[in-house]
Image: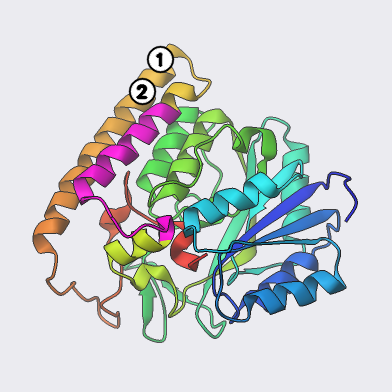
Amino acid sequence: MPDRVPLVSIGLPVRNGSAYLAQAMDDLLGQTVEDVELVVCDNASTDDTAAIVRAAARRDPRVRYRRNPTDIGALPNANLAFHLSRGAYYVLAAHDDRHAPDFLERLVGALEARPDAILAYGRKGLIDDHGRRFRHDPARGLHAVGHRVVDYDGALERPLPDDPVARYHCALRSNDCNAPIHGLFRREVLARLPEHHVHGSDRLIVASAALWGPFAFVDAELMQYRVHAGSTRYLDRATRIARETGREDVLPLVHHHVATLQRYLRAVAAAPLTPTQRLRAYTATTLSGARRHALGALGQRLEGRPRRRFVGATADTPSRASASIGGGPSLSQHAS
C-alpha cells in the first residue's frame, strides 16, 4: 500500500474473532468513503482469524495486518491498532459489530461541518449472536432478544451540552459509551487522551474527550453493536480483567478503583479548561469515584451470591451500578 496518508484509519483489534470477522471487515471495506485503511491487530488468535484477514488483504490493499506472537491483552492490542494507524480521523471498530455503508460518510461530514467538534457518532442498534435485533422495553429500561437482556441506557446518543463539564458529567453517569467510543475521532485530539489501560477505559476516553471539545451527534442508526455468547460481559471480573490486560495477577478491587480514579484526575488536569471548569470537573470526578468505591465494596460483600433476575432475564444481566468511574463497558466486550 502506498505511503500516502488516508483520510480515515479504522483500527480493528481482534482475538479469535473468526465467527463474525469476515462480515465486519466487509462492512468496513464497503464504506462509501473509500479513502481508508483498515489496521487489523491480531492478538495471537488460535482460530481462523489470520486466514480471514490475509484473504481480505489479498483482495484489498487497504488492509494492513499485524499479528502479535503472544497474547498481549485486549487493551494493549487496541492501543497498538491506534499507534499503527496514520489517518487524519480514527475509528475503533470491533470484529463482531456491523456498520451501515454510509457510517463513515455521515461521520466525516459531521466533523467537517463542525470544525470545533472532536468526535462524531450516531445511534447504535443492538443485535445478538444471530443478528437478531434487541427489543427495547422503556418501562424497565431494558433491551431483550430471546434469553439475552441488557440494560444499556443510550444516554449519550443525543446532542450533548455545550459546556464541557456538563458533557463530562453525562459520560460519567451513563452506563453506555458504546456508540461514542466506536465513533470517529480527530486523530490529533485522540492522541492526547488516555489510552486503554484499565477496565472501563471506554468511559475514561469518552469522558476525557468531553472535556476537550464538543461531540457531533448524527441522529441515525449507523452501527449495530453485537452482544453474544462470547462477549466478555458474561465473564467473572478476574477473568475479564485478565483478558483485557493480558495479566493473571489481577489487583484487588479497591486498588483498581484508586488507579482508575487517578487516571480521571490526571485527565481533568490535562484538559483545556478554565479554573472554574476544572474545579467543577474535579468535584464531579471525586463524587463519582466515591460512589463507585461504595458500590464496589457492596459488590465484594455480595460476591458469590446469585444475581437478582429481571423477568425474562438471564443471571448475566448487568447492574446499573456500573455507570460510574471504574466500571461499565469496555472494549474487551469484544474479546479483542
Alpha carbon distance from label 2 to label 1: 6 Å
Regarding residue 184, the answer to whether it shows in the image is no
Q: Secondary structure at mark 1?
A: helix
Amino acid carrying label 1: it is: Thr
Q: Which residue is mark 2?
A: 280
Q: Indicate yes or no whether the magenta region holds residue 253.
A: yes
Position in image of residue 146 (x %, y %) = 41, 86
Instruction: Count residues near mark 2 (Cα–Cα under 10 Å), then give few for <14, some for 14-19, many for 20+.
Output: some
**Front in this rendered view, residue 53 or 297:** 53
Position in image of residue 238 (x %, y %) = 28, 62
When the figure is inspected, residue 16 is found, relative to residue 5, above or below; the finding is: below
When the figure is inspected, residue 230 is found, relative to residue 218, above or below; the finding is: below
Q: Is residue 108 left or right of residue 264?
A: right
Q: Main secondary structure of the magenta part?
A: helix
> Which residue shows up at 47% across the image and 52% down it?
177
> Which residue shows up at 43% across the image and 80% down it?
229
Q: Indicate yes or no whether the magenta region holds residue 328.
A: no
Colour theme: rainbow
> Which residue shows up at 78% across the image and 77% down it?
55
The magenta-colored residue range is 244-267
- The outermost residue toward the front is 69
Mark 2 and 1 residues: CB-CB less than 8 Å, in contact? yes
Q: Secondary structure at mark 2?
A: helix
Residue 69 occupies which quadrant of the picture?
bottom right
Q: Which residue is mark 1?
A: 276
Position in image of residue 73 (x %, y %) = 47, 58
When the figure is inspected, residue 88 is found, relative to residue 115, above or below; the finding is: below
Amino acid carrying label 2: it is: Arg
Regarding residue 278, the answer to whether it shows in the image is yes
